[in-house]
């Protein structure tokens, strides 16, 4: 988010003013990509077309801004009191009492599980399952941890059997479950182009 744009709009926006996506995202306090997601999820009102360009009214964005701000998790008091001028290396370490996973993490996890269970397999999930079929193996190792693998674990199609450091981008090994093998065998082969 460009802080100059956000500050410019915060200090006296004209409520009838229309702004482009980049400025609207900065005003709401999210990245442009996240802003697009909020528009698709109907958190942010749809744009109006002006000369074949999408524009958002500042007055309508105020409601979306409040929704976004209220949905953000609150920082613990020890972290919230950090002065913004302090460089990261000069800040005090986070208190040891605040350990993850905390209640916020469990709530986010529960919402993710509910969302996955309500939805159909995504294109990425199908591609990952096809990898098992293509390699004719029931086990795959990858660097990194991806949401599609997590969704497949929620569905019960794969399990994580090993993880090697570093924690920022670990080598993770996944294995198909019996249920996953049934789904993989039912997948049609991808047509050759």
Image (cartoon, helix red, strand yellow):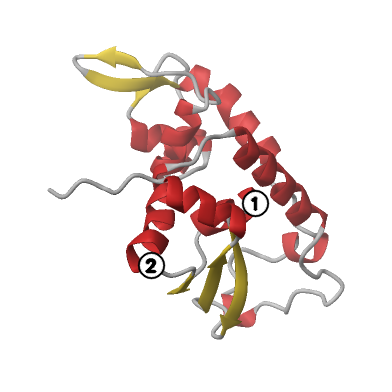
Circle nearer the N terminus (1, 2): 2
Instruction: Relative to 6, say whether 167 is above or below.
Output: below
The x and y percentages for residue 138 are 49, 68
The x and y percentages for residue 130 are 38, 55
Q: Name which residue lies at 34% across and 44% down.
A: 188
For the image, the number of numbered tags is 2
* 172 horizontally vs 185: left or right: right
Q: Nearer the viewer, residue 89 or 141?
A: 141
Look at discs 1 and 2 and give the one toward the viewer.
2
User: What is the secondary structure assignment of the residue under circle 1?
Assistant: helix
Circle 1/circle 2 CB separation < 8 Å = no
Q: Name which residue lies at 66% across and 65% down.
A: 83
Residue 12, numbered circle? none
Residue 23 visible, this angle: yes
Q: Name which residue lies at 52% across and 67% down.
A: 145
The x and y percentages for residue 3 are 44, 49
Instruction: Relative to 9, say whether 55 is above or below.
Output: above
Residue 147 visible, this angle: no
Q: Mark 1 = which residue?
A: 154
* 63 horizontally vs 28: left or right: right
Q: CA distance from mark 1 to mark 2?
A: 23 Å
Q: Mark 2 = which residue?
A: 136
The x and y percentages for residue 164 are 56, 85
Q: Residues within 10 Å of mark 2 (few under 14, many from 20)?
A: few
Q: Name which residue lies at 70% across and 51% down.
A: 109
């Amino acid at each position: 988010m460009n802080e100059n744009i956000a500050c410019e709009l915060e200090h006296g926006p004209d409520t009838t003013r229309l702004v482009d996506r980049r400025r609207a995202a900065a005003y709401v306090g999210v990245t442009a990509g996240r802003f697009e997601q909020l528009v698709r999820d109907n958190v942010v009102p749809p744009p109006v077309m002006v000369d074949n360009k999408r524009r958002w009214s500042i007055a309508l964005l105020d409601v979306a801004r409040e929704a976004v701000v209220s949905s953000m998790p609150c920082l613990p008091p020890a972290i919230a009191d950090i002065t913004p001028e302090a460089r990261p290396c000069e800040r005090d370490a986070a208190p040891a009492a605040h350990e993850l996973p905390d209640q916020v993490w469990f709530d986010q996890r529960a919402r993710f599980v509910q969302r996955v269970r309500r939805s159909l397999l995504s294109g990425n999930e199908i591609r990952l399952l096809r990898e098992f079929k293509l390699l004719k193996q029931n086990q795959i190792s990858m660097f990194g941890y991806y949401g599609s693998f997590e969704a497949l674990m929620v569905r019960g199609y794969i399990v994580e059997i090993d993880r090697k450091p570093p924690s920022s981008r670990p080598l993770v090994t996944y294995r198909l479950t019996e249920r996953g093998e049934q789904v993989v065998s039912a997948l049609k082969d991808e047509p050759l182009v």
